Amino acid sequence: MTLAWNKTRFIKSCVKSEEYPKFGHHTNLVAICGRSNVGKSSLINELCQHKGLAKTSTTPGKTQLINFFSIDDRLVLVDLPGYGYAKVPKAMKAEWGKTIATFLNEAKKLKLILFLLDIRRTPSAEDLEFLEWLAAKEKPFLLVLTKADKLSKTESYQQIGSILENLPYSGMEYVVHSSKTGLGTHDLRQKIEDYGTH
Ligand code: GTP
Ligand code: MG
């Protein structure tokens, strides 16, 4: 199934499961998660070619709510709060963790989870913890290595190798992406269409 990716709109922001929007039978969900500042909101804007659809920020921890975006009335992209921002109080971190876990556990029409890692960084303890948690779920997930424009091709190859080596699972499917240059956008859309629309 292909999507045109040209009819995009923000649906709503919320925290609690009672507040999640209601979807029709034909609407499936794809969630986007990863640490704060990894590029989740930028990725949504790039996929939709719609700057300003999802709010981005140089200040980590900007998206504290779950944000829902409708694509062509067929698919909903879900921007989850970023974890791992050091400067928030412990209680708030726990709250975010709960918000993310509740969504991933309860969203019935969730077809795919995009798990974002910054291509320049070694996965953090929190990344690994989250990945382990994800792997225990029945849902398919896909690794997206973000901000690839910040590295040369050679550096990218080295980093991909080193990131994959640091993950506790082998053979993970991944897409190298840049929201600045559009690298990987076509591939990623295709994967989202493959998983997300049937
Ligand atoms: P939170 O909402 O805080 O969890 O962050 P986020 O994961 O939504 O990150 P966001 O998309 O807001 O991006 C964070 C910063 O990284 C912003 O300054 C973006 O402009 C920048 N950024 C995101 N993606 C890319 C990319 O592909 N290339 C470059 N060069 N910068 C990027
Ligand atoms: Mg964000």
Image (cartoon, rainbow, N blue to C red):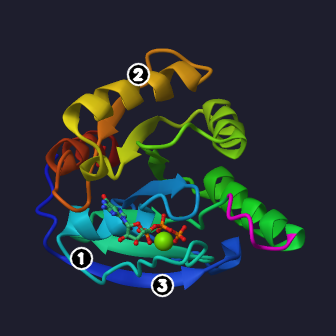
Residue 167 seen: yes
Regarding mark 3 in the picture, which secondary structure is present there?
strand
Looking at the picture, tell me which residue is in the foreground, 132 or 84.
Answer: 84
Depth-wise, is mark 3 or mark 2 nearer the camera?
2
Residue 70 lies, with reference to residue 164, above or below; the image says: below
Q: Which residue is mark 3?
A: 12
Regarding mark 2 in the picture, which secondary structure is present there?
helix
Q: Is mark 3 within 8 Å of ligand 2?
A: no
**Mark 1 → mark 3, Cα distance in angstroms:** 13 Å
Q: Quadrant of the C terminus?
A: top left
| Residue 91 position by quadrant | bottom right
Local packing at callout 1 (Cα closer than 10 Å; few below 14, some 14-19, many 20+) is many
Q: Which residue is mark 2?
A: 161
Residue 24 pos. (x, y %): 40, 68
Q: The disc labelled 2 sits on which kind of residue?
A: Gly
Q: The disc labelled 1 sits on which kind of residue?
A: Thr
Local packing at callout 3 (Cα closer than 10 Å; few below 14, some 14-19, many 20+) is some
